[in-house]
Image (cartoon, rainbow, N blue to C red):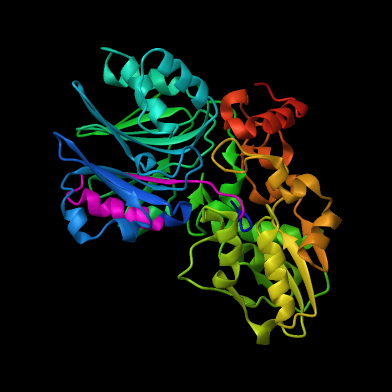
Amino acid sequence: MLGEIKGLNEECGIFGVYNHIQAAHMTYYGLHSLQHRGQEGAGIVVSNGDTLEQSKGHGLVTEVFDEERLAKLPGHSAIGHVRYSTAGEKSYENIQPLLFHSHTGSLSVAHNGNLVNATKLRSELEDEGSIFQTTSDTEVIAHLIRKGGKKPPHDRIKASLKQLEGAFAIVMLLEDQLIAALDPRGMRPLSLGKVGESYVVASETCAFDVVGAEYVREIQPGEYLVIDQDGLHSSTFAEKQDRSVCTMEYVYFARPDSQVDGDNIHSTRKQLGKKLADIAPVEADVVTGVPDSSISAAIGYAEQANIPYELGLIKNRYVGRTFIQPSQEMRERGVRMKLSPVRKIVEGKRVVMVDDSIVRGTTSRRIVSMLKEAGAKEVHVRISSPPIKHPCFYGIDTSTSSELIAANNSIEEIREEIGADSISFLPTDEMVEAIGRDDSSPNCGHCLACFTGNYPTDIYENSVLPHEKDQLVQEVVKQGASY
């Protein structure tokens, strides 16, 4: 999930719009701006006030939708989703939004995050007669809602959300309402915007700029927001808990022009780079960043160190993020297609290569090798986050610690493995200080589990797939988490 989480895979993007004559087109543009959050599939569900219609497919937003397909989705409200499969198989059925019909009406759900108790809930529901059509944890939500029987719809939905554990930002669409909800710890970002008389919600605020919407506010942890013809109706489905925003949103996932909880991502990443320059200085001739997510941190490092920043690496814009490719083999093959060194910039130079993270080490090793092949005299790697040593259960598919280079190697061994002349990571405390969240929570409002092993929720034995279970449970038990 990071620059090298080009070895981590995570995240999905969700978007919703209520009361707009071109709801499907608005959602298309919103999803396009969120494409960096998932490239495996895209879907849109629209409402015309009476019925919900769906269109989805594998691939990029521009590959799934064209004008002809959008024209077949008339309606005034819509929700959409771009997907990276962190839970469930990569089948067509798992592409969201998921759409469900019953005699009491229709419901569509799009979800970003991962439920740590999904397997437990699914087993209980199946024992009670539920039949699942997908392997996505999102379908659990719909079955819980249906299980609520004849209670008012919002009572059923709230009761269902209250049973979920883990990370979830959710948009739902009924025939005449749009619903947005965020888990009680606010682990995933979700924002509210407005364009004219229409409301929009999105995983990132960069989507608002594309559709011409004005940022209104963040959806709050535990909030249940209903948007209908009478406006906004905010309530809660669960008591707010200590904030635990995924730190990787700041470090890697979010686009630089987005803001998370009021913080501009580009500015935050520059501060990470400045802090990194303070704690890990080195004599060098140029600083370069690994495109795109590391550029801001590299600029901050260069400014603080008073070393020229140069475009030492150029990204091929027609190649997708290596971390989103579904196999390690494809990731490795994609590195040279994706990045090219600028020989005249690095030749004969001592280069500081700033990246946002290292997960497996494959990409870093290849980039260091490319820079040296292009004539770099020295390559000093600087990482604007701590070593990633622990698996994530909240939407990042680091399935076992055995995949993480920092979980099994010392800093010096990592340096040797990737072929760098030196390497330094930004310590956790300094990273949190640089981000500067004004939060009184114990972790200053961050989820730091992938760095520290301290998980903000209980971790269940069935939070993971069977073939991963034994090793992961042993790892988590050693760290003192409950399951």
Kindly indicate the quadrant of the structure image that contains residue 424.
bottom right
Left or right: 33 as drawn, with respect to 73: right
Q: What x and y, as percent, mark residue 176? A: 20, 32
The quarter of the picture where the C terminus appears is top right
Residue 31 falls inside the magenta stretch: yes
Image coords of residue 322 (percent x, y): 55, 60
Q: Is residue 346 above or below residue 191?
A: below
- The magenta stretch spans which residues? 7-33
Q: Is residue 64 visible?
A: yes
Instruction: Give the residue at x 43% y 33%.
Output: 135
Is 157 in front, or is 263? 157
Q: Which residue appears at 43% of the width and 29% of the height?
A: 223
Vertical order, 137 against 60 (above or below): above
Front residue of 54/442: it is 54
* Count of numbered circles on the image: 0
Quadrant of the rendered image containing residue 28: bottom left
Q: How far from the left and from the top, in percent, is residue 225?
A: 35, 31
Out of 414 and 334, give the one closest to the viewer.
334
Q: Residue at x 54, y 40 (%)?
A: 395
Q: Which residue lies most toward the bottom here?
A: 344
Q: Give above or below for 145 relative to 87.
A: above
* Picture residue at 51% right of the left edge, 73% below the top: 316
Asked whether the viewer can see residue 440, the reply is no
Left or right: residue 256 versus residue 377 is left
